[in-house]
Amino acid sequence: MSRSEVLRLFPGLETRGLTGAAIFADGQMYNPPRLVLAAVKSAESRGAVVANHVEAVGLIREGSRVTGVEVRDNIDGGTFAISGSVVLNAAGPYGEGLIRRTLGLRLQPPGNYSRDACFVVRGHLLHPSLTIAVQGQTGDPDAIVSRGNRHLFVAPWRQYSLVGTWHKVCSPEEELSVSEQELNRFVAEVNAGYPDLNLSVDDISMYNCGFVPFGENREGAKDLRYGHRSRLVDHSRDGLENLISLVGVRFTTGRREAERAVALAFHKLGKRPPPGKTSSTPMWGGDIENWSTFKASLESESTVRLHEDVWSALAHNYGTEAGQVLETIAADPALAHRIGDTDCIRAQVLYAVREEMATSLSDVVFRRTDLATGGHPGPEALEACAEMVSEELELDGAEQSRQMAEVERRFGP
């Protein structure tokens, strides 16, 4: 792309030294929590037993074997044990703490972790389909090819813009949050890279963050070594023949890491692992050959009349299973109504509770629908959703208020 074309698309770029740009294609997740749910549903459809809100709190050891996992039901607070011939510790960055607390084991070398964070702004800040990388104020000393400081990305995402990513070396045992002071620093850094953005903290509709494996860094370092690597650990070296730990890095490598972990589990059972099929098996709702054709047929073959934006959201969130959501409207046409000004319809809320193991308002708005995945949906929309969830789960007024307050806290720094 020529220099003049770049400046036509992004007129606020620094012009000194600018000679042009290159464009490459990349994938983007429409709704990451629903992609996780699609993986869970895919596993369940093939025989996995799925339990929601069940937390692994300990590993049960008998001599040189780990015979199971002690878990807590975070709905009623009860605890119980799950037995297994092989135990795969796939708790990600939290897995290292789990084996240390319950077995006294430490990964060698110990893991290094970062809290990666980005923030969301309503609307497309720069371009509706192109992401731009702007210069940040820190660099990666381990980069093989470097042209200065690392990049921050401003990416269009649905009707929003994603801005990030920022890294902070820390322990997964620390609180997972982003302070208002940090958000101010993030905004200042991206404004320095593209001054015409002129963003303020008030423009942020929400932030997202999570722990990921990271490179080795000294405390207080400014230029961080990123060094993201997944780790698959066979604990036979620790004297435990049937325990495996997997610390993954990202969705793009998740399928490969899962195949490696499952193959190791088969070997520990004395069996030959079957050929992996995930490279050719569509995930739940994902058996779509042509996106445009699928979306058009979903709308034309339904008797339900919905706004174009709602059809698009249903297709993205549920894929080929969107018809299951629409079936609930047959019994109650009012379920086709949108919730507030969002692209979420009332049928999705009931479907989340009845068919997708949603047990709270937070489950519904953050992890089953896209009602609040990009920002606050508005007081009226949140209250309408809360009333539906409360009626379906038979919650009293006090519990409904508590759950609404829990959701509201998510939008504060």
Image: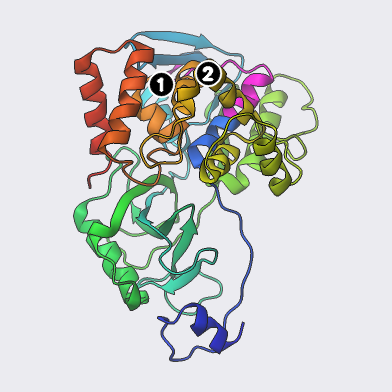
Give the percent coordinates (x, y) of residue 222: 32, 67
* Residue shown at 34% from the left, 72% from the top: 197
Front residue of 140/117: it is 117
Q: Which amino acid does label 2 sit on?
A: Glu
Q: Which of the 4 quarters of the picture holds residue 239?
A: top right
Image spot of residue 333 (x, y percent): 50, 22
Residue on which disc 1 sits? 55
Asked if residue 45 is among those painted magenta in the image, a careful observer would answer: yes
Badge 1 local density, few (<14 within 10 Å), some, or many (20+)? some
Q: At 40% from the left edge and 81% from the top edge, which residue is drawn?
A: 12
Which sits earlier in the primary sequence, circle 1 or circle 2? 1
The residue to which callout 2 is attached is: 355
Q: Which colour scheme is used?
A: rainbow
Tag 2: Cα neighbours inside 10 Å, few (<14), some, or many (≥20)? Answer: few
Q: Which amino acid does label 1 sit on?
A: Glu
Residue 400 vs residue 229, the one in the foreground: 400
Q: What element carries label 1?
A: strand
Q: Which residue is drawn at 53% across and 18% down?
A: 355
Tell whether position 145 is magenta: no
* Quadrant housing the N terminus: bottom right
Q: Residue furthest bottom?
A: 16
Tell me where residue 201 appears, x and y as whole percent: 24, 59
- CB within 8 Å, label 1 to label 2: no
Which residue is more in the foreground, 112 or 177? 177
* Up/down of 258 relative to 178, above or below: above
Query: Marks 1 and 2, Cα distance to the nearest angstrom?
Result: 21 Å
Under circle 2, the secondary element is helix
Q: Which of 264 and 9 is in front in this view?
A: 9
Q: Give the range drawn in magenta.
A: 39-60
